[in-house]
Each structure stands twice: as C-alpha cells, then as structure tokens.
C-alpha cells in the first residue's frame, strides 16, 4: 500500500514540474510586441477615460502582449486582439442606458490603424456617448471580429465598414434607444466573409425595401439579428432566390412589417432558430416548418392575423423542436394527439389563440417539457383523468420537468385530476377562469416547489386544503371567485413563510384566527372581499408592515377602524373597505401611498369629507353618512384624480368650481346628495367619460362648456331644478351614449337638437320636464343606436313621428351581451343604469343592453295609432298612455312579439282588440283601460292572464274578466271555445318551440314571464347576478399575467 502511495506522489511531482516549465518556460520564450504596436496602443489608451483603472497594466515599460485585453501572434508578436469590453455590464440605475461608473469613455483614436495585424476588436458595453463610430475602422483590413454593441455610439453607421472583406462577426447592437442609424445597405455586399450580423435596436427605417435581397448575397451568413430595428414595411414576404445556404438563426422580431408571412423561410433547411415575434404578419403559416430537421426554436407570437389549423400544423414531425411559441396568433382548431411525439419539446406557448376541444392525454409523453401555456383559448371538456406514456420518462412520473402549467381562461370543466398532485417540480400552477368544480385536491399541497397557485374564477367547492400551509415557497395563492366554504385557520398558513399575494375573495370562507396570531408571512397583496372576517376588525393585520394592496370589502366587519391601522396605511396603493358596517370618523388627512386607490363606499362613516395626504387616483366615499361641503381644496390635494364618487351622502352647498381643474378625471359621480347652486364649468376635463350629478338640488342653466367633452359617454343631471334650453353645444358630444335629464324644468324644442349627431346615443331620457312643440316631423334617422327613448310627462304634441319606425336597434331582436360599463379604470367602473317607469319602476343595470323601450306617455300626441311602431319587433316596453291618440290598434300589432310591457291607456282608441294579441306570448303587463274599445275581448292565450284592470273604463267592451257580452249564444261560444282551445294548444306549442330555440341565445325565461308577470323583474335581477361572475372574470384577466396588479373592485351606482 505504501509503495503504491509513493509511486502516485512521484508521478504527481513530475506532473507539476512539467506543467510549470510548459506554462512558463524560460524568459527567452516570452513573445514581445513590436515597438510600433506598443506606441499605437499607448496612444489609443491616452484617448480613453478609465475611471476604475481597469487597464493599469498598459505601461510603456512593459510588454504589451501581457496587457489585459491584448493578445499577440505567437510567432510574429504582432497584436491581433484588442478586447476592452466592460467585464461587468450591470447597468447603473442613475445613468439610464449606460453601464456604471467603471465604463470606458472618451475617443477612439486612429492609432489603431497602426495595428496592421489586428483581427479582433471588442469595444462593447462602454460609454462612448455622443461620438460616432469612427470611419477609419473600415480600414482595418484584416479584421475578422468587430463588436461595438451597447457602447453608446450615436449617429450613422459608416459605410466604410463594407470594406472589411475578412469580417466574419459584426455586432453594433444597442439595448435601449435607436440612437444609431443605418442609412442604407449598399455597403453590405462587401462583407463577403460575414457569418454573424447583429443590428438589434438600431434604426433601419431608411434602408432599402430590398434589404433582404442584399443580405441574401452573403453566402456564409449564418445568423441575422435585426430585432426592433424599424425595418421597412412590406419587405420580407418574398425572395427571388434563396442563397441562404448556411442560415441557421434569423431574428426579425418587433418590426412592423404589415406583410404576408415569408413563406420562403420554409425552404431554408439549415434553420435552427426563427423569431418573428410581433411583426404584424398576416396570412397562413406554412405547414412545412414541422419538417425542418434542425429547427429548435420557432416563435411567431403576437402576430394576430397569422392563421393555421392547429391539428394539421402540430401534426407534423417536429423531430427536434424545443421551443414552440405561437401565443396570440390565430392558430385554430384542436390539439392533435400526436403532440406527444414532440419528445424534445421544453417550452410550449399557444396562449390566446383559438384552440378548441380537449387537452390530449398524450401530453404525458413530453418528458422534457418545462413550460406549458394554453391559457386564453376556448378549450373545453375535462382535463385528462390520466396521462399516457409518462412511464418512458426518467422518473416514471407525469411531466417530470414541468415547472409552469398555465391553463387559465378556457372552458375546462369537471374535477381537478389526481396527476396534478404528482407534478413534483411544478412552480407555477394557473387554471383560473374555467368551469372546474369539485374539491381542490389535497395532494396539490404536497408539491413543495410551488411558488404560485391560481385557481380563481371557477366553481370549485369544499374547503381550502390545510396542506397548502406546508408550502414554504408559495408566494402567490389566488383561489378567489369560487364556491369554497368552510373555515380557514392558522393551520392553512403554518409554514407559508414566503406568501406575498393572498386572494380569497368572493367565496363563502370564514377566517378564524386568534387575536394574538402572528402570521409567518408578510403579505403585500391581500384580497379577502366577501369572506367573513367580522364582526371585529382583524387585529392580525397589524403584523403586516409591508402591505400594499388590501381588499376587505363585504367582509361583515363592523365598528370603527382601529387607530393602529392608519399607522400602517401609508404604504397602501389600494384600500378597499367597501360594503361593510364600519363607522366613525376618518382621519384627516388619510395616509396612503402616492397615486393610490381608496374605496370606502357603502359603510356608515360620518363627519366631513377627509382628504388624502398624498395624491390618489381613485377616491370613492359613496353611500356613507358624510355631510357638510365638498372640500374646496380637493383639486390641490388630488390633482391627478381619475375616479371620484361621493354619491349617496348628505353633502350640501355648491360643487367647487375647482372641479374643472382636475383634468385627469374619467368619472365624476356626486349624485344623491343635497348639493345646490349651479353646475361648474368642467369643459377642461377632456378625458371625462361619466358625469353624474343627478338627485341633487342644482339649479340654473346647463353650461355650454359641456360641449367640449368629446369623450363623454354618460351624462346624468336627472332629478334637479335645472331650467332653460339645452345648449346647442350638446351636438358636439359625439361619444355620448346615455343622456338622462329627467325630472327637471328644462324647456325648448327637441328635434332642433337631436336631428344630427348622437350616432352612439343609446339612452335618451327627457321625462318630466317642460319640453314642448310639435315633433311630428322629427327625423330620428341619426339615432340608429337608440334603445331607450323616454319623453314622458312633457308638453309635446302632434302625431307620433314616422321616423320612430326606423329606430334600427329597436327593430332587432335583443341579443346583445355587452354591459354598459363606463369610465373603466383598473377593474373599477361606473355601471350604467336606467329606471323604466311602468307600474312598479324597474331599474336595469347589467341587463340594460337587453332593454329596448319607448315611453311617450303624458303628452298631447294625437292622430291615429302610430302603426310605424309595429316595425320595432325588438321592442320590450311601449307606453303611449295618457295622450289623445285615436283610431284602431293595427291587426299586425302581434309583430311586437318581444313586448313585456304595453300601456295604451287613457287615449281615444276604439274598435275591437285585435285577436292576434293572444299570440304575444311574453307580454307580462297590459293596460288598455280608459279608451273606447268595443266588442268582445279575445280572452284566450296570453290575454287570459290579465285581470279586469287591464280593460276597465271601456264602456262597450265585454267578455273575459269584464261582463259577458249580450246575446252570446252559449252553444256557439262552446264550439268556438273548442276550436280556439285546439288552436290555442297548437299555438302554445308553436310558441313554446320558438321560445326554447330563442333561449339558446339569451331570452329563454320569457315563457315563464308570460305566466308569472312579477317574475320578469326577477329574471333581470338573475341576469345581473350571472353577469357579476363574468364581469369579475373580464376585469381579472390582466392579473393572470401580472400577479402584482391590483385586485378587482366593483363600483355600483
């Protein structure tokens, strides 16, 4: 044993001796640089500023071949490499676009030309700011490598570089602004040896449209990097011939080509890397890319107009593909089961495409997959109950390398499968915004590498697994907007020391923490809205010193806010305590972070309106008990305010004139107070979407400056004491969709104002004012978006305008599904509403897009029944009562087959009630009283659901719920009844089948409403509640990409 050890030590000794002499030799073998090169380098150094002394070794008495960054030829001693690039390219935050105080700067001296053997020059990552690239560099005839990237040069790239016929590597890329310009490519053909070209972030907007043909002349070119260079539009779709026989890498990303897809690429068999991200390409993606054997990286993301059938495209070979990135393109169709054959695939992103169908179980074969993102598609069905083929993976476990799984915003349903709990390397799990149900598997809590869990906006039920409390790396937990129930205790967070974002809102969870609980984590973003925290204010919050976003809305908390909380609030960028029973006075000023959002609406806070210490962007104190005046200095305290709501309080006095100085405002809602005085001038608030001053005591005329608000969509001055005529400047409100001026003292002529413009107007409510005049000739052809027209209780006369029959929106079946949400700001919105005054007034909010209505009651209209209204087959509400309308109801009135409410009472209508009205199967309320109708009521079908109140005070009307008609032949009536019963049976089944078909769209419940009239209001309330979930989903989408975004807040007006 000792002999062996001695032998080993002897051999090691010989090795070290030999190595020493090999590396150092004797002094005679040291290569010395020439005096000419030494002089040239010293002159070069004299022009350079070297603040950190990185090149102190460059001294006249030393051998330049041993200087840092210098390399000499082993035989001749000539300098062949000069490399002075920054060895530490970490950016200096105080000098954007530069590389810290250790950078070289100064000038590049032409003494470099004396280095006649120079082959390699690297000046990258320095700060030669304000100087151009020296033209003399084009005279370094032996140069093979030139790197000037990120060095701060400005101006034009000198065409003399085209003289470098030996150059193989040229990198002049930047990393911030396009401060360097290439004016043309005419000099490029001279680079006959070029292999790698990198002009990233240079300005190439002025080069030739045929730049691609020029590059195609360089036969040895293997890499082209021209990302974000403003290349000319329409310049890449075609190539006359392909000379790119060696091309392996092409990166043209972030150029707005506005061109067809360059199909010629599919014929370049040497390609390994293709990046055409965000290039504004259109057309079809060739299928042949799957057959390129060398292709490893393929990125066409953010080309919204590129399309291909996914089943065909992904069904190809793709033998060696590793990165396949097609998000936000129009790839459509189903995922093929052959996707499991892409065994080298590591990164797969097809998010926000148009994929449909299910997720194939063959994804289990993708043993190398680390990133899978299929979010934002229309995938449906259940997640695979099990995955196939993973037994061939190294660990015999499903998707053993998967780190990120993102399936958010699809239509997936069913339960979460067990294999999710076997993804042991998973760090990011996102399956929010689907239709998943059932419990959250406890096994997910055993995935110890998890950093983010997003299961929000599903139908998941049951409790939150306690196993989640063992996830020490978990920083994001979002299970909001589900149907989870049960207790959340301290055990759920026992070891969750990394938790920073916790979103539990919109569930039925009860948080049960002891008053002295010390959380193991420091949360930054906390959303517990609609969870039960109360009745006491949660004391454990005082331990969260770093909290920035806090949503405790609708959390059953009552009583005052403790003083200690306001000591923590100065870091808050979002504070939402809305919909609780909090009370007391607020501190003045309120301590929040700059540009914060504050929502304390729907509580019992009292006192005067407090102001924030720092400027905020959202300020909502609506529906409390605040009183006194609106602070006069509000514009000074919140100059950049975007969303202001103080509605539903007890505020008095004038609206401050300084409101007009808050020019960033998007929404102003001061409704439902006791404000008086005149409307202030807000003409400078050009961004304003919503101005709601309704339900106050404002007086005077409407200011003409309102006509300057080109972005105004919703204007409410209802229920005030405003007088005078509407200003002619209203015609300039080109974006207006809602105009609510009801219940004022306004006067004047309506047609003169509304016969031009207002093409987007959807709701016009002028009820209960003093408008007058003959409007028979009113031309409403411009109001083609109008869906609610309320002119009731004015002094209008003449015939009902013929043009009403051309109101296009009312002539269509109501099938809209959009919601009238104005002034939307970071998930906060003003929710439009309208009250229909028919019997019991009904307010429509989210269902407003379904509503079409005309109410011209309580005026002095005359003439015969306006038959043109029968053309409005989409009309839901028609009220022409209390006028002087005469004549008969048209026989084809049944064309109004969507009517829910019809009031023709208190007119001079006569004749028989049309029998066709029995087929108006969804009619829920009918009033024909106080007219001169005669004959028998057609009391079958839908008409049989109405009481005598619908027909009273018609002296010559009989039958149905009124007195029997005289001289009726009972036998004849029985025969007639038998026949009509038979016809009614057929009619009812006919209309029932229509109703079922129509229910597939949106109005299914109308058949039920026909039987139970009071249910109509309930139906619309139900749709409002269903819309709540959808709106929550819509508002949350950006947060699935950025978990630091603000939580969703809802504002209801």
Image (tube, grey):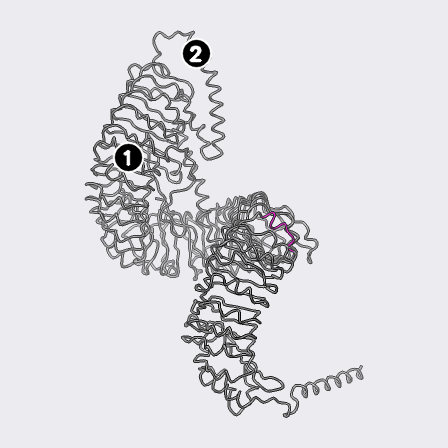
**Which one is nearer the viewer's eye here, 419 or 112?**
112
Q: Residue 855: where, in percent of width, then height?
A: 30, 31
**Placement of 41 over or under 187, stated as above or below:** below
Q: Residue 149: where, in percent of width, then height?
A: 49, 72
> Few, some or many C-alpha atoms within 10 Å of disc 1 (few <14, some 14-19, many ≥20)?
some
**Which one is nearer the viewer's eye here, 739 or 600?**
739
- Residue 586, can we see it? yes
Q: Which mark is residue 779?
A: 1
Q: Which mark is residue 976?
A: 2
Q: Picture quarter containing residue 595?
A: bottom left
In the rendered image, residue 1042 lying in the magenta stretch gets the answer no
Q: Picture quarter containing residue 888?
A: top left
Task: Indicate left or right for 742 with 357 as reference.
Answer: left
Give the residues drawn in magenta, as a range. 310-318
In the rendered image, residue 317 lying in the magenta stretch gets the answer yes
**Placement of 695 over or under 562, stated as above or below:** above
Task: Indicate left or right for 833 with 1027 as reference.
Answer: left
- Image quarter hosting the N terminus: bottom right
> Few, some or many C-alpha atoms within 10 Å of disc 2 (few <14, some 14-19, many ≥20)?
few
Q: Picture quarter containing residue 16?
A: bottom right
Q: Residue 620: where, in percent of width, then height?
A: 34, 51
Q: Earlier in the sequence, mark 2 or mark 1?
A: 1
SS state under label 2: helix
Q: Which mark is residue 983?
A: none
- Give the Cα distance between marks 2 and 1: 46 Å
**Residue projecting furthest to the front:** 240
- Image quarter hosting the C terminus: top left
Task: Indicate left or right for 928 with 413 as reference.
Answer: left
Q: Residue 815: where, in percent of width, then height?
A: 43, 36
**Which one is nearer the viewer's eye here, 417 or 159?**
159
**Which one is nearer the viewer's eye here, 936 or 960?**
936
């Amino acid at each position: 044993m000792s002999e062996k050890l001695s032998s080993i030590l002897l051999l090691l000794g010989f090795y070290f001796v030999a190595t020493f002499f090999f590396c150092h030799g004797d002094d005679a073998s040291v290569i010395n640089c020439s005096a000419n090169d030494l002089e040239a380098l010293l002159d070069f150094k004299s022009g350079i500023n070297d603040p950190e002394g990185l090149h102190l070794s460059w001294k006249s008495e030393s051998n330049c071949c041993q200087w840092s960054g210098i390399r000499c030829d082993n035989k001749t001693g000539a300098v062949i490499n000069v490399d002075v690039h920054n060895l530490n390219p970490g950016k200096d935050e105080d000098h954007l676009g530069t590389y810290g105080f250790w950078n070289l700067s100064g000038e590049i001296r032409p003494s470099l030309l004396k280095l006649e053997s120079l082959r390699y020059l690297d000046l990258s990552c320095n700060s030669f700011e304000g100087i151009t690239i020296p033209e003399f560099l084009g005279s370094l005839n032996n140069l093979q490598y030139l790197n000037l990237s990120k060095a701060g040069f400005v101006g034009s790239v000198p065409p003399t570089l085209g003289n470098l016929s030996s150059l193989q590597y040229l990198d002049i890329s930047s990393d911030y602004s396009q401060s360097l310009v290439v004016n043309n490519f005419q000099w490029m053909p001279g680079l006959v040896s070029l292999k790698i070209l990198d002009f990233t972030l240079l300005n190439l907007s002025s080069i030739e449209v045929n730049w691609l043909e020029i590059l195609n002349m360089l036969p040895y070119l293997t890499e082209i990097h021209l990302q974000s260079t403003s290349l000319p539009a329409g310049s890449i779709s075609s190539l006359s011939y392909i000379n790119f026989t060696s091309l392996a890498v092409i990166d043209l990303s972030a150029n707005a080509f506005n061109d067809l897809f360059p199909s010629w690429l599919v014929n370049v068999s040497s390609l390994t890397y293709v990046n055409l991200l965000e290039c504004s390409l259109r057309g079809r993606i060739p299928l042949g890319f799957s057959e390129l054997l060398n292709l490893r990286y393929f990125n066409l993301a953010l080309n919204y107009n590129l399309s291909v059938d996914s089943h065909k495209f992904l069904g190809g070979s793709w033998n060696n593909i590793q990165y396949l990135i097609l998000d936000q393109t129009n790839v459509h169709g189903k995922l093929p089961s052959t996707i499991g054959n892409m065994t080298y695939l590591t990164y797969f992103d097809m998010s926000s495409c148009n994929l449909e169908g299910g997720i194939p179980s063959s994804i289990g074969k993708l043993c190398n997959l680390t990133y899978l993102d299929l979010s934002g598609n229309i995938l449906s069905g259940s997640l695979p109950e099990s995955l196939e083929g993973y037994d061939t993976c190294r660990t015999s476990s499903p998707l053993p390398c998967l780190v990120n799984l993102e399936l958010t915003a699809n239509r997936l349903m069913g339960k979460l499968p067990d294999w999710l709990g076997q993804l042991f390397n998973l760090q990011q799990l996102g399956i929010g915004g689907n239709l998943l149900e059932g419990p959250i598997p406890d096994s997910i809590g055993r995935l110890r590498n998890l950093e983010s869990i997003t299961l929000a906006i599903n139908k998941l039920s049951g409790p939150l697994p306690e196993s989640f409390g063992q996830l020490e790396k978990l920083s994001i937990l979002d299970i909001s907007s589900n149907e989870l129930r049960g207790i959340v205790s301290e055990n759920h967070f026992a070891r969750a020391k990394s938790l920073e974002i916790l979103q539990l809102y919109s569930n039925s969870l009860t948080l049960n923490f002891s008053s002295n609980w010390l959380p193991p984590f420091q949360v930054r973003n906390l959303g517990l809205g609609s969870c039960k925290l109360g009745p006491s204010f949660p004391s454990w919050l005082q331990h969260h010193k770093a909290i920035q976003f806090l949503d405790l809305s609708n959390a059953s908390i009552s009583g005052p806010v403790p003083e200690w909380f306001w000591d923590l609030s100065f870091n808050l960028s979002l504070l939402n305590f809305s919909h609780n029973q909090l009370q007391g006075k607020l501190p003045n000023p309120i301590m929040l972070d700059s540009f914060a959002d504050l929502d304390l609406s729907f509580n019992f806070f009292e006192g005067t309106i407090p102001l924030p210490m720092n400027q905020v962007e959202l300020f909502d104190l609506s529906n409390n008990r605040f009183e006194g005046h609106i602070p006069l200095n509000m514009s000074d305290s919140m100059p950049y305010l975007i969303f202001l709501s103080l509605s539903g309080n007890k505020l008095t006095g004038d609206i401050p004139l300084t409101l007009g100085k808050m020019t960033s405002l998007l929404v102003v809602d001061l409704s439902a107070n006791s404000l008086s005085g005149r409307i202030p001038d807000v003409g400078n608030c050009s961004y304003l979407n919503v101005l709601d001053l309704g339900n106050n005591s404002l007086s005077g005329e409407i200011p003409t400056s309102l006509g300057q608000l080109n972005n105004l969509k919703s204007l409410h001055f209802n229920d005030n004491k405003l007088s005078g005529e509407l200003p002619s400047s209203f015609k300039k409100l080109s974006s207006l969709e809602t105009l609510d001026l009801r219940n004022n003292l306004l006067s004047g002529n309506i047609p003169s104002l509304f016969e031009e413009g207002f093409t987007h107007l959807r709701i016009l409510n002028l009820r209960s004012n003093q408008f007058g005049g003959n409007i028979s000739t009113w031309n409403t052809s411009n109001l083609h978006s109008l869906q609610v027209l309320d002119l009731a209780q004015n002094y209008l006369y003449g015939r009902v305008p013929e043009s009403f029959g051309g109101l296009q929106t009312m002539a269509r079946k109501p099938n809209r599904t959009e919601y009238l949400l104005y002034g939307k700001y970071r998930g906060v919105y003003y929710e439009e509403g309208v009250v229909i005054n028919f019997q019991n007034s009904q307010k429509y909010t989210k269902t407003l897009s379904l509503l079409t209505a005309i109410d011209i009651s309580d005026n002095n209209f005359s003439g015969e029944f306006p038959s043109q209204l029968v053309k409005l087959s989409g009309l839901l509400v028609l009220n022409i009562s209390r006028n002087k309308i005469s004549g008969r109801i048209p026989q084809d009135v049944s064309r109004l087959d969507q009517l829910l409410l019809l009031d023709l009472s208190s007119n001079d209508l006569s004749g028989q009630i049309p029998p066709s009205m029995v087929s108006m199967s969804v009619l829920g309320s009918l009033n024909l009283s106080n007219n001169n109708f005669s004959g028998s009521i057609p009391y079958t079908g839908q008409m049989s659901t109405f009481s005598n109140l619908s027909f009273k005070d018609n002296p010559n009307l009989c039958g149905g719920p009124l007195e029997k008609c005289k001289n009726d032949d009972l036998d004849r009536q029985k025969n007639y009844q038998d026949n009509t019963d038979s016809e009614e049976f057929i009619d009812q089944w006919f209309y029932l089948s229509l109703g079922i078909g129509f229910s597939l769209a949106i109005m299914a419940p109308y058949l039920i409403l026909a039987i139970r009239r009071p249910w109509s209001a309930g139906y619309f309330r139900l749709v409002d509640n269903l819309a709540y979930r959808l709106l929550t989903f819509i508002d949350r989408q950006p947060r699935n990409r950025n978990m630091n975004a603000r939580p969703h807040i809802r504002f209801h007006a």
